[in-house]
Image (tube, helix red, strand yellow):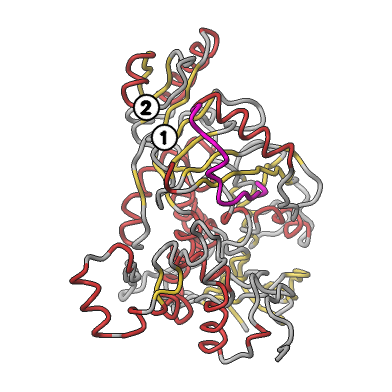
Amino acid sequence: MTYDVAVVGAGVIGGLISRELSRYDIKVALLEKCNDVAMGTTKANSAIVHGGFDAMPGTLKAQMNVKGTVLMPELCEKLSVPYKNNGSLVVAFSDDEMEHVRQLYDRGVKNKVPGLSVIGRDKLRSIEPEISPEAVGALLCESAGIVCPYELTIAAVENAVENGVEFIRNCEVKAVNSVGGKYVLETTAGEIETSFVINAAGNFSDDLAGMVGDTSFKIIPRKGEYYLLDKSVGNLAVHTVFQCPNEMGKGILVTPTVDGNLLIGPTAVNIDDKSDTDTTPEGLDEILEKALKSIPAVSVRNAITSFAGVRSHPDTDDFIIGWSCAADRFLNVAGIESPGLSSAPAIALRVCEILSEKLSMPEKPDFKDTRKPPVRFRHLNDEQREELIRQNSAYGRIVCRCETITEGEIIDAVRAPAGARDVDGVKRRTRAGMGRCQGGFCSGKVVEILSRELGIPMNEVTKFGGGSKIIYERTK
């Protein structure tokens, strides 16, 4: 297999880079070591589109964040991904913290963030009724928003595949060799030859860079734990509510999600194991304690799940986007921690600009920049539902009762470009299993549908690839 460009890592960064590269008449492969896209940091983060006031002026973080936030609404519209411009607040609980809020405001002005203002207690209470009475004021950022990071990634990769990108899953890069002016990647899916490599490997980007002798940066894995609360309390926060940040990040937030739930977290702890996504009693206790400081009505009695993600904090304290110092056709896109999701659309454009310095990239005349909206049965009115069922009876069979997900939607998710190959892949594409019962009723039916659609025995269907089998043997 020979390509012009191999993008390593199918998170939101690799996915949007691949989608942007699919505009051009070049041969592109997107390599992912897992069984699906968005399996690393992308599937477990705060889902915030930050305004851009937190990053230090002049940094890549600041530049990419502000530009990416401007690009995000139109991109989401083109890819049929839910996006909400709900705004954000950095809440102060003392005069000293109000001084920090004013410093963030000044920084945001330097970063050219629109819609910033410092507000007092009365204004804060009027726009965020459940805020703590201890709050004395806040920084209001009207340009901030929320998006679903894994849904954005899925949409970007689907669009990229529709435009000719080859998505190769279960393809872990083990070695990178320079042979005759090209790179030969030794992977678990066989050898792959490519003229250029784009390193979007997230927490493992320093390991991949090391394969070409690049030791110019180190990734420090930073774990963050979260609670996800039921939709019944999704209206406790209108805005994304932050507390004043510290050296470890933006702190514990309380935010609605685009699907109507309430998310609280994350913690921030440097760890050694890049794959450690276990939650801890200590971490979950910290989340609740600090979330209550912002919104006293928060209660984990409404929690439907908890989870953890690992962010790729670079020892440079800034995004790393540029050619490797050790290999002239190896492009690092590394250390993309928060505000990485917000910055992703701008990073994808920047990578294409850098790549065009060394690779001829004529535009495709037939590039398709939109993605067909997936069927969302729960959002249709009765008349639309009846018409859909007339066309395909599979949409008349409800599989997930909590989220009102039909068999037709699950079939669509499996058959889509770069479609679902496991239960969690169906879950991320359709929300089957994301409701109050967390798959207690629907997971068995999802396994049946995957078995039928993929043409494999039920005991070969996995939760998330690898050895995560759900059913082992028939007992009767």
Q: Where the N terminus falls, by quadrant?
A: bottom right
Helix or strand or loop: what does disc 2 sit on? loop
Q: Is residue 413 above or below residue 89?
A: below
Give the residue at mark 1: 237
Q: Are marks 1 and 2 in contact (CB under 8 Å)?
A: yes
**250 or 162: nearer the viewer:** 250
Q: Which residues are magenta?
A: 295-311
Q: To which quarter of the image does residue 162 belong? A: bottom left
> Percent x, y for residue 90?
47, 25
The three-letter amino acid code for the residue at tag 2 is Glu
The three-letter amino acid code for the residue at tag 1 is Ala
* Label 2 Cα crowd, 10 Å radius (few <14 / some 14-19 / many 20+): some
Residue at 52 percent across and 44 percent down: it is 302
Q: Is residue 115 left or right of residue 417?
A: left
Q: Where the C terminus falls, by quadrant?
A: bottom right
Q: Is residue 296 magenta?
A: yes
Q: To which quarter of the image does residue 193 belong? A: bottom right
Q: Is residue 4 above or below residue 307?
A: below
**304 or 208: nearer the viewer:** 304
Residue at 55 percent across and 84 percent down: it is 448
Q: To which quarter of the image does residue 444 belong? A: bottom right
Outermost front residue = 476
Q: Is residue 225 above or below residue 180?
A: above
Give the residue at mark 2: 128
Of pointers 1 and 2, the one earlier in the residue sequence: 2
> Percent x, y for residue 24?
42, 70
> Percent x, y for residue 242?
50, 29
Helix or strand or loop: what does disc 1 sit on? loop
Residue at 42 percent across and 22 percent down: it is 139
Q: Gap in Å between the C-alphas at discs 1 and 2?
A: 7 Å
